[in-house]
Structure formats: C-alpha cells, structure tokens
Image: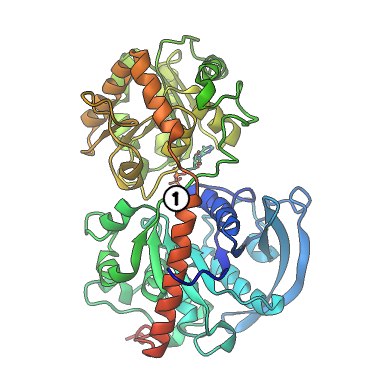
C-alpha cells in the first residue's frame, strides 16, 4: 500500500482486556490497538461499561456527561467514561444503568438491544468528541449493525462521509439472530429484512453477523485457513453463500498474542520465571502446578494442560469419548474451563474417578491459566473448528507443546512433528475422531520420553514470532483497502441497502 498517513481508527468490541473478558475476542481487542498505535496510528476503543467494571479500579474519568442516543423512535441517555489500555490507548466506556448494570456480560434476553444501544452511543459519541475516524473496526455480531447503519441511516451524514468499515469475524457460530423488532430498535424497519436467493432464513430473521458481512467495506477473519474454510457449506454456518458473494473482500489475518501479558520471563503468577535461554528453570513450574492441583508430584509423568471455554466447538465430545482410555496411559491432566453444564458434569466425573491423575477447575481464573501454560508439558486443543485459537500460541510461548486438531488457526500455527526430518512444533491430527485424538496424544507422550527431541520442540515453539507486529501491519493494509473500497462504492452509488420486508 502506498499511502502511509497515520489513520484514525475506532475499534468497537463487547469485550476488551483488561476491562472484561470471556474469550479470545477480549485478548484481541486489548492487544491489537496497542500494536497499531506502535505503528503510529490514532486508535481508540469503545465498549460498554458493564456493572462489574469498577471505575475506581481502572481509574476511569468522565469524558462526556449524558447525551441523547436514538433508540426505537425514542431517545435514551448515554454517558462516556474513559480509561486506558496500557498507558496510551484511550478506551471509551458507554454507560447506561438500564442496559449494563448487571452481573454478567452476555446471555440476557435483551442482548440485541443492549449491543445496539452500545453501538449507536459509540457513533453519536464521536460527534461530541469531534473526532471522526477513518475506520470503524467492528468485531463479531455485537457490533455488526454499524456497517449496516453506515450504508443506510448514516449514509448521507457528512460527519461519516469518509469513514469506512471493517468487520472482523472471530467466530461464525455466534451470529446474533433476532426477530423483526430489532430492526425497529435499530431504526432500520423501513429497510426490512435482507434477501438472498440461497438463504431463505434471512427473509424471516435478523442475523446481525450477516449484516456485518453484507455491508462492511472489507471483512476479515482471524486466520487464513478459517477464511477459506468458511466458504464451504460444511463450515459456513449457513452464511457461506453470502461469504462466497463477498469473497473478493474477505481476508484472513492471524491474531497475535500480547507479549507483555504472556511473558514467562516476567509473569508474576508463575512459580519460577524463565525464557528460552534459561529453559531449565521452567522445570520448577511443573511440581508447583502438580501440588496446587493435588496431583502426584512427578517430573517424568507427562502433564497435559487444557484451558478453554467448555463448548462443543472445542472438541469436548470426542475428548469425553476417549478420556478414560487416555487416563489409562501414564499421564496427568489439568483442566481449567467453564461453559456447557454437560461438560462440567463429564469433567467432574473424571476428576472423581481419577483423583491422582486428573484435576479439574470449573471456573475462570487467569492466574491459574498462566500456571498451566508454564507448568504443563502438553497443551491440548482438539477443536472441531477454530477460527484462530490463542491457547496454542500462548502454550508455545511458555514451552508447553501443543496437541491440536488441524483446523483453522490451529492448522496455521502448529506443524506436526515429522520424525524423519525432526521438523515441526507440536502434534496435530486431521479427522475429527476420538481415536485420531488418542493417537496424537500417544505420539506426544512417546516423544516426551526423548529429552532432546522434546527440548527442540519447546525451543521452536518459544522462538516463534506470535507478536502482533506482523498482523497489525496487515490490518493497516486492510484499513487502506477498506478506504479504497469505500471511496469506489461511494462513486458507483450504493447497491441495494437491504430489501423491503415482503
Ligand atoms: P475462544 O476465543 O474461542 O474462547 P481462544 O483460544 O481464542 O478461544 O482464546 C481463549 C482465551 O481465553 C485464552 O487467552 C485462554 O487462556 C483464556 N481462557 C479460556 N478459558 C479460561 C478460563 N476458564 N480461565 C482463564 N482463562 C481462560
């Protein structure tokens, strides 16, 4: 890209580290802005101020007192508190007691309204701040309405005339599907449902993610492999016809991880800090973890770590089919995760049945997650699909060797060990099948017996570059593409802005 002037970017996300985190989205929204800022861009982030975010703890300041936000033909009030990611990236937190003063982040019956209010407040806030971004970068379904608005109710608004939208899909399975009323809430009723000849559902429901894909100037997902996989009906979660229509503006950019947060040399949570030059020191973290988990302290028993949302996507069905056979092997398991109740049950049973070999923590605990990355020998991610996956990259950075299913970002980051050439940085299997998973773990456990091979695997993982540097530069290219597309589409006059409700 030729033009390299600093860009003004507003990033919209439902989760941002360190303020609120459920999964990898929060990691990305908390670390990509820092990397973009280091490249010289003016990046700011907006998110809701959930009740659990304590203004004092984060030193939040009031930036905008109450201002009006149109909702459902009425007007509601929002206010903006301001915090920082790191020292320098401004974060605008949208306040409204009715929508956000609750214990949790998601899973409320009015989630559509809550996130539409957040998005509308973020756009209206910009006028009051007198800060007009070149790019509005939206993440996942919660913010997918924004590209739709920019091409409809805001399309004649001079304030946003030169603002392009980028829409990032972190997980196609969570689309934000609601009824017609959402269009009224969003002020889009007069445009009605969308229409697509191969997607009958779109004429009956409001699929927010579909709208992000349809209206954004460019779209991307979080690994190159996943960007290709979702074009196929098997992986497209029913949106593949739309994605194929838009493939000329669909890209894949691998996530990075935050090297300040995930750094074994400075990690305050782990028993013994270390780096690739002092790998021997890592060994002290294993007995510390075994002790904390109530497992037998033993250096030669391979310790398998797993830190994950407990969801179907993550491979827990094939794992539960084979877990008893795995625990017949000479190995130990430490699992940290929360999610679907039936996986809680399955894992509780395993913990009961194999007390000395399996420890299960059914909670969200960042500190323990770091201890598992530092203390485990193997890190398991047998995902059915995985848009990017951060766990395997964090594990490698900490010298835990990944065992993964070769899908999405896992396939893009983990190369199966080739016993002949010695190349590879982990273990992977292709078929989504319990015995393929079993065989990959057996191979890993066998290789664990060979100290030199293992050390090489660890060193390769720890030396890999999973920083945001390269990916942030790719996002800058993507932003320029979005601006070019926006300018071109403006000239060519907008295509259909969504068809009228039949
Ligand atoms: P996803 O976004 O699908 O949940 P990722 O692998 O992209 O999966 O990111 C998951 C992130 O959340 C990682 O940083 C992982 O360490 C963290 N994480 C997941 N579950 C837990 C948990 N129970 N406690 C602490 N951290 C967790």
Q: Is residue 127 left or right of residue 21?
A: right
Task: Using the image as rendered, state which of residue 95 and residue 289 is in the foreground.
Answer: 289
Q: Is residue 135 above or below residue 375?
A: below
Q: Dot 1, how many residues are within 10 Å of its Cα: few (below 14), some (14-19), or many (20+)?
A: many
- Pointer 1: what residue? 255
Q: Position of residue 313 (x, y in %)?
A: 35, 45
Q: Quadrant of the rendered structure where residue 332 is?
A: top left
What residue is drawn where x is 73% and y is 63%?
A: 81
Q: Position of residue 144 (x, y in %)?
A: 46, 68
Q: Which quarter shows the N terminus?
A: bottom left
Q: Which quarter shows the C terminus?
A: bottom left
Q: Position of residue 210 (x, y in %)?
A: 37, 69
Q: Position of residue 467 (x, y in %)?
A: 49, 45
Task: Using the image as rendered, state which of residue 163 and residue 24 is in the foreground.
Answer: 163
Whether label 1 lies within 8 Å of ligand 1 gets the answer yes
Q: Quadrant of the rendered structure where residue 46 is?
A: bottom right
Q: Is residue 94 left or right of residue 316?
A: right
The image shows a total of numbered marks equal to 1
Q: Is residue 195 above or below residue 346?
A: below
Task: Using the image as rendered, state which of residue 457 and residue 56 is in the foreground.
Answer: 457
What residue is drawn where x is 29% and y is 44%?
A: 407
What residue is drawn where x is 43% and y is 41%?
A: 340
Res 114 seen here: no
What residue is drawn where x is 49% and y is 86%?
A: 155
Q: Is residue 64 left or right of residue 352?
A: right
Res 236 seen here: yes
Image coloring type? rainbow
Element carrying mark 1:
loop
Q: Is residue 339 above or below residue 203?
A: above
């Amino acid at each position: 890209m030729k033009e390299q002037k600093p860009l003004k970017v507003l990033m919209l996300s439902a989760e941002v580290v360190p303020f609120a985190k459920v999964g990898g989205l929060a990691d990305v929204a908390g670390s990509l802005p820092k990397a973009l800022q280091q490249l010289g861009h003016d990046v700011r982030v907006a998110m809701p101020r959930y009740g659990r975010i304590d203004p004092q703890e984060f030193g939040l300041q009031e930036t905008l007192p109450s201002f009006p936000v149109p909702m459902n033909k009425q007007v509601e009030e929002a206010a903006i508190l301001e915090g920082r990611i790191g020292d320098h990236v401004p974060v605008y937190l949208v306040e409204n007691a009715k929508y956000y003063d609750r214990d949790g982040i998601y899973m409320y019956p009015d989630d559509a309204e809550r996130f539409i209010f957040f998005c509308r407040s973020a756009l209206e806030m910009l006028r009051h701040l007198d800060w007009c971004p070149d790019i509005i970068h939206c993440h996942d379904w919660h913010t997918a309405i924004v590209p739709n608005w920019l091409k409809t109710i805001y399309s004649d608004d001079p304030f946003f005339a030169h603002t392009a939208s980028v829409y990032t899909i972190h997980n196609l399975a969570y689309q934000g599907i609601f009824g017609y009323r959402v269009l009224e809430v969003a002020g889009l009723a007069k445009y009605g449902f969308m229409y697509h000849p191969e997607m009958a559902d779109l004429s009956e429901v409001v699929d927010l993610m579909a709208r992000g894909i349809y209206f954004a100037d460019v779209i991307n997902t979080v690994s190159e492999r996943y960007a290709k996989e979702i074009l196929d009906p098997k992986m497209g979660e029913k949106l593949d016809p739309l994605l194929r229509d838009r493939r000329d503006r669909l890209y894949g950019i691998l996530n990075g991880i935050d090297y300040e947060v995930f750094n074994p040399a400075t990690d305050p949570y782990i028993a013994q800090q270390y780096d690739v030059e002092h790998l021997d020191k890592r060994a002290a973290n294993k007995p510390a973890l075994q002790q904390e988990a109530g497992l037998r302290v033993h250096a030669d028993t391979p310790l398998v770590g797993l830190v994950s949302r407990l969801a179907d996507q993550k491979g827990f069905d094939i794992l539960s089919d084979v877990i008893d056979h795995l625990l017949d092997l000479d190995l130990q398991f430490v699992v940290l995760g929360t999610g679907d109740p039936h996986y809680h049950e399955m894992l509780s049973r395993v913990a009961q049945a194999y007390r000395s070999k399996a420890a299960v923590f059914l909670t969200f605990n960042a500190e323990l997650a770091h201890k598992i990355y530092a203390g485990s020998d193997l890190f398991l991610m047998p995902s059915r699909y995985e848009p990017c996956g951060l766990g395997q990259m964090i594990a490698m950075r900490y010298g835990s060797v990944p065992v993964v299913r070769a899908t999405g970002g896992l396939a893009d980051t983990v190369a199966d060990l080739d016993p002949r050439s010695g190349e590879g940085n982990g273990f992977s299997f292709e078929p989504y099948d319990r015995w393929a998973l079993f065989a990959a773990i057996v191979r890993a456990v066998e290789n664990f017996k060979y100290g030199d091979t293992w050390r090489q695997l660890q060193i390769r993982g720890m030396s890999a570059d999973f920083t945001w540097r390269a990916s942030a530069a790719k996002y800058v290219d993507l932003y320029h593409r979005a601006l070019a597309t926006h300018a071109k589409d403006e000239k060519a006059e907008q295509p259909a802005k969504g068809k009228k409700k039949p």
